[in-house]
Amino acid sequence: MDAYGKIQFRNTDLNQISDNHERQREDQKFQDSMNAYQVEEAVGGSSPARKLPVKQHISVLQKELDTMRKEIHTNRKIIQETTNSLNQIENSSRESCSEVVKYISTELDQLGDDLSKVINVEKQETAFLRNQIVELNQDKVKLQQNTVLLNTRVEDVEQTVGIDL
């Protein structure tokens, strides 16, 4: 709640306290006049109907009713302002959430693309290395064959010359 709302709540509280004191004073006046009426009636005073404080009581009730109407009106304003603030917060949070979702989805797409590129590079390197292994195995076989051939020639030369190397 903003500072204006807090001040408004405090003003409302002060107004309610002031109105409560006023109502208490009015009620006390009413009670005093009722007590005076009862004392006068017990003593045997004249014309009790004239002394009955009905008009005063009605005016007190009317003031209380007006105060209650003001409080209701103030409370309705506060409720409306709170509802508006809630709606603004809800809208801003939705916008923030959608921005975060958009950012995350963009980042995920980019990470997916990067991962695909890395996987393709790795596949190419794996294929290249397999080809190298095949070539090396072929070279190894050729070297083994050449070694066998050279060993055979050396044996033939040794037999021809008759010298054992």
Image (tube, rainbow, N blue to C red):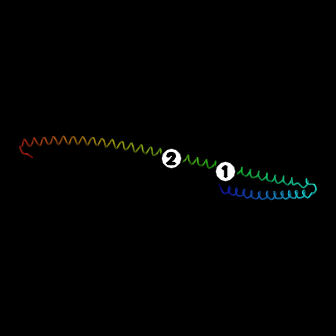
**Residue 64, percent from left and from top:** 79, 53
| Residue at image mark 1 | 82
Which of the two residues, 87 or 30, is positioned nearer the viewer here?
Answer: 30
Q: Position of residue 148 (x, y in %)?
A: 16, 41
Within the image, what quadrant is residue 4 found in?
bottom right
- Most extreme residue toward the right is 46
Position of residue 37 in the picture relative to residue 108 (left or right): right
Q: Are marks 2 and 1 in contact (CB under 8 Å)?
A: no
Residue at x-position 72% and y-position 51%: 75
Pick the residue in front: 110 or 7: 7
Residue for point 59% across, 48% down: 93
Using the image as rendered, state which of residue 20 and residue 88 is in the foreground.
20
**Which circle, 2 or 1, is nearer the viewer?**
1
For the residue labelled by badge 2, is the local secondary structure a helix, a strand or a loop? helix
* Residue at the image point whose x is 76% and y is 57% from the top: 20
Query: Amino acid type of disc 2?
Result: Ile
- Outermost residue toward the left? 162
Q: Which residue is mark 2?
A: 104
The answer for how far apart the CA atoms under marks 2 and 1 are is 32 Å
Which three-letter amino acid code belongs to the residue tagged 1?
Thr
Q: Residues within 10 Å of mark 2 (few under 14, many from 20)?
A: few
Upstream in the sequence, badge 2 or badge 1? Answer: 1
**Residue 22 position by quadrant:** bottom right
